[in-house]
Amino acid sequence: MPTTLFDNTSAEAAEEAPGFKRQIRCIALLCALTMTPGLLAQQEAQTERPGTLVNLDLKELMDIEITSVSRRPERLSDAAASIFVITGDDIRRSGATNLPEALRLAPALQVVQVSASSYTVSARGFISSSSNKLLVLIDGRVVYTPFFAGVFWDVQDVLLEDVERIEVISGPGGTLWGVNAVNGIINIITRSAKQTQSELLTAGAGNRESIGAMRYGSGAGAYGGYRLYGKYVDRSRTETANGTVKDDAVHKGQVGFRTDWEHGANQFTLLGNAYKGSEGQPPPGTLATGAKFTLGTIQISGWNVTSHWQRSLGNGSTITVQGYFDRTERTVPPTFAETLNIGDLQFLHSLKLGGQHSIAWGGEYRYGLDSVRNSPYVAFLPAHLNQKWMALFAQDEITLRKDLRLTLGARSERNDYTGYEFLPNVRLAWNVAADHLLWTAASRTVRAPSRFDHDVFVPGNPPFLLTGGAGVISEVANVYELGYRGQPVSSITFSATAFHSLYDHLRTQEIAPSRTSFFFANGMKGTTSGLEIWGSYQASQRWRLSAGFDGLTEHLELRPGSNDTATLAAQQGRDAKQSWRLRSSLDLPYHCEFDVTARRVSALADPTVPAYSAVDLRFGWKPRRGTEVSVTGRNLFGKGHGEFTDISTRTEIGRSVFIAYINHFGGS
Amino acid sequence: MHRRRAWPWVLVIVAVFCVSQGRGNAAIPEYQVKAAFIYKFATYIRWPATTVPDATTPFVIGIIGKDPFGPALRDLVRGERVQGRVILIMRLSRLEEALRCDVLFISSSERGNLRQIFAALGGAPVLTVGDMDQFAELGGMINLITTEDHQIRFDINKNAIDRAGLKASSQLLHLARIVDESRSGGR
């Protein structure tokens, strides 16, 4: 039974009849709210004096619930980059039930849903069915697939309750993260096992999906702890705008573990996940080739293990070694089936030199074994391919003055298609005043070809209509950024980033001189410019407002010799030029929470998607410590909207309601 | 159909109205609660008799490193006393000043300097409190820990307390999780 400070008006009474009393009061409150708010004000007046805390004994202090770190206005980060952090608490309060929905919280990301579990996420334009310029990591494991160039969001899952934070970096991160971190990095980080030492049961159901999950955490001693989890997701079929039912229902199960040990200067983490599921394959299918075939049910499965060791060497110097193995299997009848095994090993040494230099350097080696079962419709040639990637990088953050830091970094990365790629960046951060940071950066970054760019042939046997891209090279971007991040007063945080990116060698699909086939080439170039702005305002201790804006302009053109006017038009027509986000997070009395999120996205030209607004509401109530009941309503107003791809196949996203129950048992 | 669209707005209006009516049953900011813990710890610890000065000497709570409390600690102890002594909050600018403290809060910004701080303290009877990972295992006396459901717990390194000649009440030890220093030398 929680006895929070603000409850001391009835602390004794509450002990007599805990649950019941609280329920009555919450119900009574809802009635009272509409009629006699004055009563409420009176009751709460006495709760403001911080001095009352000193009168509590230790045991009572231990019963107090604190506002989590995430709820404090975020501290000004010193990083010279456009970073937005989604905290675990933000995710909980958004009512998101999967990772892409949680990513909608980041103002710089464009997240669009195409079917029940098919999402596309991009930053700074270039959205496509496989948005190929955004790198995504889950606990240090890269989930961007070198097979398809992009992320299969339908299989990326974690127990959302275990997420500590998601770092969303918009803009290039090639030096530290490698090729493919062209327009952004999404870094999903789960909590350490030590922080999840309770048993958790969560169950939720609604008109679109139902989810059940359990987690067991234990073993926390002086040295560490472990957790095990399992979850099951079931999503029902969606409909297109004209009411056609799509075959996109999903059933998926996932289990995993994480264990953390600390011993002296050493920290060790071992974690793993395994999943299996099936999902319907609605038209036009994962790979549309123009051929008429019957689409079958997609089977997905995979498992991965990551180990991470960090040792502090004193003097601010640390060594990190990380290795992971990741196996993914995807069967997409009748077009293809793929099995990909990836092993990755990386090393990082960070140290301080002479008080002025903060150096990080390291290397990475990755080996992939890809095996595709080809079909008469599509072939990846060769069907079996082993690839390796190697990288070395170094970065130095130099403190020029107390308020001025210069970062110089470069990475050399080798891949089997294009050889060595050079990824340098320069960043300058100036702390104009204690809570005001101005920063600027120039970076060169590349997207290396994937098997999809190089090896794909349609149909599966000659004569081919699409003959891969044997001559495909890396897409290159030179990106210039200018940003401000600050906390003008303690209740307001604000961030603005302007960028200008110059792209070259963007992928196109050229018509061969024979005019009997297509092939992939690098026939497009262009520039994008944009603005990413967000801020938050802690209106009171219990009410937080935040807003975000993302604006983009694109000027793409064909390079001499290219004839792919279709890609040129399509790419510029696919990106939303503007999007807005507004969010209100409110703590109500009696452990109730109320959250509102509204977003507006401008129209897409090709395929046509009208501009849309969406409003989500969540009401949560914690009847007692560790228990939470919530109702989330999504897209509550209006008559539904589509977000991406052609109206004949895309899901019309309508009203949905989800009721969730979470219970923590025991724990620390 | 029309009613359906209206109800969420009713909730919004009610919620906003409720905010305008003043503060409510919210949780308390982390460092206000942590400040209370620090004050409370001082009342559960006995300092060695030789070092207890008279009531006119202030009881000093020092903060080393980046101060996470803001005004919270100062506001909390205003008008309070420990052992009959007025409480003074001191933000350390030099390491030597640590010896003037009765309680020393070591900010997580000083994680890399723990060894020097503990060395500077020697075996002096200064209660060290921190809120960083492994603080007690690394030689600190009391470590404040935030649990998953947003409550505060604490670890106590009893050996460190004993070495400094301090005496922790059994009630304090009972509520704490007792931890050992890391075998790798308690760095």
Image (spheres, coloured by chain):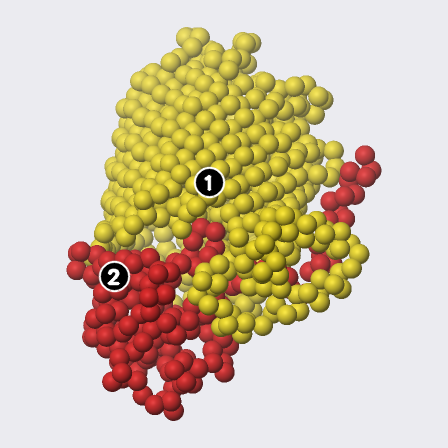
Which chain can be seen in red?
Answer: B
Q: What chain letter is assigned to the residue under label 2?
A: B
Residue at which label 1 appears:
A200
* Vertical relation: A461 (above or below) B91: above
Tell me what residue is drawn at x 33 percent, y 38 percent: A271
* Vertical relation: A495 (above or below) A470: below
Q: Can residue B130 be seen from the camera position used here?
A: no
Tell me what residue is drawn at x 50 percent, y 60 percent: A64
Q: How many marks?
A: 2
- In this picture, residue A651 sits left or right of residue B151: right
> For residue A284, which quarter of the picture?
top right
Q: Nearer the viewer, mark 2 or mark 1?
A: 1
Q: Can residue A307 be seen from the camera position used here?
A: yes
Tell me what residue is drawn at x 22 percent, y 59 percent: B181
Residue B70 spot, x, y in % from top left: 47, 72
Q: Colour of chain A?
A: yellow
Q: Nearer the viewer, residue A43 or A191?
A: A43
Q: Which mark is residue B138?
A: 2
Question: What is the crowding at mark 1: few (fewer than 14 residues within 10 Å), some, or many (at least 20)?
Answer: many
Per the image, label 2 sits on a secondary structure element best described as loop
Identity, as a three-letter code, of the amino acid under mark 2? Leu
Q: Which mark is residue B33?
A: none
